[in-house]
Amino acid sequence: MTKRQWVTKFMLMHKWVFACGFLITTLMTMINLMYPFLNGRIINVAFYDQDMSAFLNLCLIYAGILVFNQFVVATLNNLISSQLMTGFVFDIRRALFSKILHKKGKDLSGMYSGDMISRMNHDATDIMNLVFWSGLWGYSNFLHIVFAVGFMFYYNVFLGAFTVVLVPAVFFASKYFKARAQKVTQDIATEQGKLSSYLFEIVKNLQEIKILNAGKKVTSVYLRKTTSINKLNVENGKIEVTTERVNAFITLLAQLLIFTVCAYFIVKGDMQLGVFVAAVSYFSMAVTYFSSINSKIVDVWGQTVSLQRVVDILNEEEEDYKDNQPHTQIKEGRVEFNNVTFGYSEDRPILNGFNLRIDAGSTIGLVGRSGAGKTTMGNLLYNLYNVDGGELLIDGVNVNEYNLHSLRSQVGIVHQENILYDNTLRYNLSFSNNKDNDDVLMEALKKAALYDVVLTFPDGLDTLLGTDGQELSGGQKQRLAIARILVKNPKILIFDEATSSLDSKNEALIRQMMSELSQDRTLIIIAHRYSTIASCDKIAVLADGVVQGYDTHDVLITSNQTYMDLFSEQYAGGEAV
C-alpha cells in the first residue's frame, strides 16, 4: 500500500471524528475571517455614518461572535482534537506493534531495536501531526488565504492582484530548500534510530562493559554518533533559519508596499478608513497564513519522512500463520530432514543437501563447529525460516503445512541465554501459555528443581524477579527457562547450548532433567560438552552443511574423523565434547 492509502485507512477508522473536526475547523476559520470585516464596518459607522445605534449593534454582534467562538467552538475543537489525536496515534502504534511481532525471520537479523522503538513512538506521533495539525491546520490556512484574497478583491482589485502576486513569490522562495531539507531529515531519523539501538545495547550490557573496562571505548562511540547527529541538526537548523528569514523579508517588503498603496487611495479619496483597516488586516492575514504554511513545510517534509519509515514496516511481508489450516496435533514427534538446503543469504548456504531422521521419542545430540547449522535446524523446526530446497517433515507432514500457532505451541527451545522479564515469577512461567494455574506452575518448578527455591521467596509465585531476572543466579535462570518450557509442554524439545555457561553442579541438575524430559517427547540437544550428550540415543555430526556421521558416541569416536577432532580439541582443553 502507498503512503496515501495507509493514511486513508487510518483516517477511515475515525471518519466521524475527522468529519466533526473538519466542520469545527471550517466554522472557526469563517468566524476568524469575519473579525476584520466587522472592524472595518464599526470604524466606518463611527467615523462616517456617525450612527450610534448601528455602532452599538455591530459591537454586540462582534462580542457575541467572540464569546461563541471562544467558549463554545474552541471547547468543542479541543475535545474533538484530543479524541482524534489519541485514537489515531493509538491505531498506528497498534498496527506497527502487530507488524513487528509478525516479522518474517529473514527481516529480524537486520532489525535495530532502538530504530523500531523510534518508529513506534516518534514516527507514529509525527504521522498524527502530519494528518491532524498539518492536515486540518493546512486546510484552515488555505481557507484563510482564499477568503482573505477574496475580500482584498472585494475592497480593491489592485490590492487583490498585488496579494495574488505575492503567493507564488513566497512559494518559489521555499521550494529551493525542499530537496536538501528532506535528505537531512531522513539522515537524522536514520542516525537517531541507530543511536537508540546502541544505547539500548549499552544499558542492557552495562555490567559486562564494566568488567571489560570498556567505558572509554563505548563513550567514544557514543560521542561520535551523537556528534554526527548534532552536525545534521545544525545543518537542518540552518535551512530552517534561512527559510524563515527569506519569508520574513518578503513579508516585510509586502507590508510596506501595501501601506503605500492604501495611503495613495486614501489621499485620492477612493478608500475609507474602515476599508483601509480591514484591507490591511486581510492582507496581513493572507501573508501570515501563507508564510506560516511556508515555514512549516520543513516540518511537513520531516513528518513525511516519518510516514515513509512507518509505511516501510507496515508494507513488509508478514509470517503466514496459515490460520486456515487445522491445528494439527504432533502425536509422535518424528522429524525428517530430506535433502534440505538453506542459507540466510543466497550466496552462503548453511545446509546443503542435509538429511537426518530423528525417531519419535528419541534423544539425539547435535555437534559441530560454529556455523555448521546446529541452531539453524531449530530455527527451521519451528518454521522461523522456510527451507530453500528439499523438505522438513514432522510426523510425515511438511512444516509449511502446519498452522504456525499450532506448530510453535508444540515445539519448544531452551537457549544458552534466555530472556526473563521484569515481572513476577508467575508472569515469566506463563508468559507464552497464559496458564496461571498454580498446580501446573508448581509442577513445572518441581521438574526444573526450582520448587524448594521458590518456597524461600516471600511472595512465592508473585515474587518480582527484577530486570533480566537479577534476583536469580545463572543456574536458576536456566532452570526457570526450562520450567517455562515445561508449562508449555511441547512434543519436541530443543536444548541449544543450554548448559554451556553453567557450573558442573547446575549442569548435572539439567542433565538429570533432560533424562526425565525424554519420556514421551523427542529431545534434540545441541552441545559441545560430551557430558551433556553422553546419554543421547544417537549423536549427529554436522559439517559442511551435511550430516557426516550419525551414531552413538562409542561408534563415532572410532569411525568419524570430524567427531574425533572435536573430541580431541575439547578434551585437550580440559573438557570433553
Image (spheres, grey):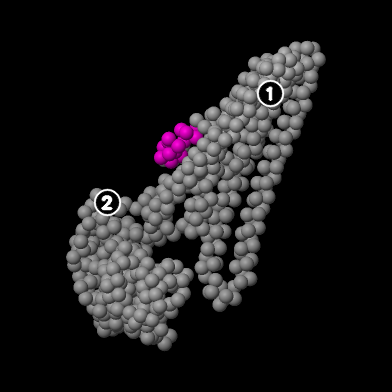
Rendered-image quadrant of the C terminus? bottom left
Residue at far top of view:
269
The image shows residue 408, relative to residue 4, as above or below, that is: below
- In percent of the image, x 21 and y 54: which residue is there? 326
Indicate yes or no whether the magenta region holds residue 270: no
Choose the circle earlier in sequence order: 1 or 2: 1
Q: What stretch is highlighted in magenta?
A: 7-22
Tell me the CA gap for discs 1 and 2: 66 Å
Which residue is disc 1 drawn over?
39
Q: Where is residue 303 in the image (x, y as percent from the top left)?
A: 55, 43
Dominant SS of magenta comes to helix
Helix, strand or loop at mark 2: loop
The image shows residue 143, relative to residue 430, as above or below, that is: above
Q: Quadrant of residue 536?
A: bottom left
Q: Position of residue 393 (x, y in %)?
A: 23, 61
Characterize the local packing of mark 1: few (<14), some (14-19) or many (20 or more) Cα atoms within 10 angstroms.
some
Q: Residue 323 carries which label?
A: 2
Q: Disc 2 marks which amino acid?
A: Asp
The image shows residue 54, relative to residue 206, as above or below, that is: above
